[in-house]
Each structure stands twice: as C-alpha cells, then as structure tokens.
Amino acid sequence: MPMKGTKCLQVVAVCAAICGCEQRGLEADGFFHGNVEDRDLRVSFVEAERIATIIPEEGTAVRKGELLATLETVRFENEVRAAQARVRSVETQVKTAKNNMDRNAQLVKTRAVALQDADNAEAQYNYVLAEKEVAEAQLMIAEQKIKDSKLYAPDDGVVRKRLLNPGEFTSADRPVLQLALTSPKWVRCYMKETELAKHKINDKASVKADGCAKPFKAWLGYISPTAEFMPKNIETDELRPMLVYEVRFYVEDPEGILKLGAPVVVECK
C-alpha cells in the first residue's frame, strides 16, 4: 500500500507539472493568456517658455482634450502686439502705394510722367503687397504661440508622473507629464499557427481577470502578419522555439476596472 500510494503521488505530481506548463504558456483551443497593454505617452509644449501652471496631480485620470498645463504668456503677448502694429503699418503703405500707382497710370496716358515712373510705382505697390503678406503671416505665428501656451491631453489616460514643475523652463524636447494611456485598451496575446484558421478579425471574445466577477466584452482587433518566436519570458523550454503570431484583443472597459499590465485570460469564441 505505501508503494502504491507513493506511485499515485508521483502520477499526481507529474500531472500537476504538465498542467502548470499549460497554464504558463501552452494555450487550450480558444483560450489565450496575456496582459493588458501598458502604454506611455510623454506630453510637451511646442514653444520654449517658463511653466506657469500644471493642473493634474500624479494618479489623476484625464480625458482627451482636457487642459493639463499652461506657459507664461507675457513674451508671446508682446510679440502679438508688435506683429499687429507691423500689419497696420504695412496696410498704410499699401494704401499709399496703390494711390500712387493709380495716379501714375492716369498721368502716363497724357505723358505727364515717364513710363518708367509708372512702372516703378506699380513695382512698389507689388512689393508692399508682399510685405503685407509677410506681416500677416508673422501675426498668425505670434497668435499661434498664445494658443500653444496651453497643453491639452492628447488622449484618455492617467497622469503617471510629473516630469517638470511650475517655474521650470520647458521646450519641445522636455516633456512635462508622463501619461499612461487607457484608451483604447487591449490585451496582447500570442496565437499558434494552428489557431489562425479558427479566428478572424472582429471575432467576439471575453476577458477574465483576477478579482473581477464578470468577464469583459472584447473582440479580436489585430493579428500580426509575420510570425515570431515565443517571447523568452515564457518559462517552458518547449515553447521558446515555437513560432507564434501576436494578436490584440480590444476590451470594453468604460469604468476603467482593468489595470494596465494586469494578467488576464481571453476566451475567443
């Protein structure tokens, strides 16, 4: 009896080890193990200036289009006023050059002025017209700097880290905030070649996570066109040389329950 009991225990241990290997990597048909994709985005201003305010704290959820930070705008406002003055000055020059050109065009008909004088007046008018376009473009650039002094969230996410603080100088190559993107939310898995024929884009799926009573609705949104070897973080030696295809299951999680990086099990129907 002791020998039989020992053999039974050995069989159970072997079976448990095999099951453990399957859970760590080998997928049953229609079931896939993966993690909720964790994506970062570093946001920065276009212009170089001192930071005036940073609104959200670390850990705060933000929505796309929400105001995140502002720059000091004194220098930008002065540039706008200077550009506006330049436009007004050039508009006056255009009006004067237009009157001079029209007058010379009439006088040249009676030979009161030389043809060369009329040509010069027309050339001067065309020159100040070009100057007006340049001045108006400079005004638009200055006004755009005022708009660019406000930093908005490019997508839904959570503020992971403040990289700078109010009072510090920033530029386009110095990000202000690091966001963890939460939309869209997907699960990265790996599918064996034998599974490819059974699934296609937009197939319905469900995602199960630890601690969540109900599964999340999902769908197959991406299948890699190229094969790759099973990532080395898979523990079993048998799986490492196996060719697989990366797939992504997009998850419906409007309440933000699924955490980024969380391990999940996907069932693709």
Image (spheres, rainbow, N blue to C red):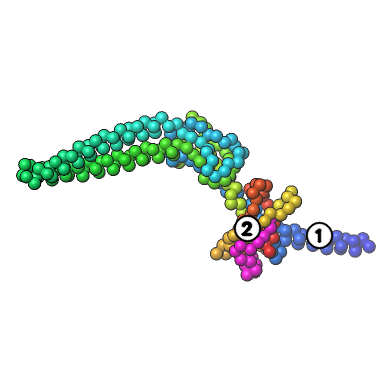
Please say whether residue 169 is visible from this viewpoint. no
Instruction: Judge by depth and name the residue closer to the eye, 268 or 13.
Output: 268
On screen, residue 159 versus residue 97, left or right, reads: right
What is the quadrant of the C terminus in the image?
A: bottom right
Select label 2 or label 1 by which is in front.
2
Q: Residue at x 45, y 36 (%)?
A: 149
Identify the image quadrant of residue 9: bottom right
Which residue is identified by label 2?
Answer: 249
Q: Tag 2's secondary structure? A: strand
How many residues crowd mark 1 within 10 Å: few (<14), some (14–19), many (20+)?
few
Q: Position of residue 182 (x, y in %)?
A: 60, 47
Q: State the residue position of label 1.
A: 13
- Is residue 245 rendered magenta in the image? no
Q: In screen coordinates, is 37 left or right of 15?
A: left
From the viewer's perspective, tell me whether residue 164 is left or right of residue 95.
right
Locate residue 234: give its quadrant.
bottom right
Q: Residue at x 69, y 60 (%)?
A: 267
* Residue lying at the far left of the rendered structure: 111
> Which mark, by number, is residue 105?
none
Identify the residue shown where x is 71% and y is 54%. 215
Q: Amino acid at mark 2?
A: Phe
Query: Over which residues does the magenta segment extend?
Result: 192-207
Q: Earlier in the sequence, mark 2 or mark 1?
A: 1
Q: Measure how far apart labels 2 and 1 are at the Cα level.
A: 34 Å
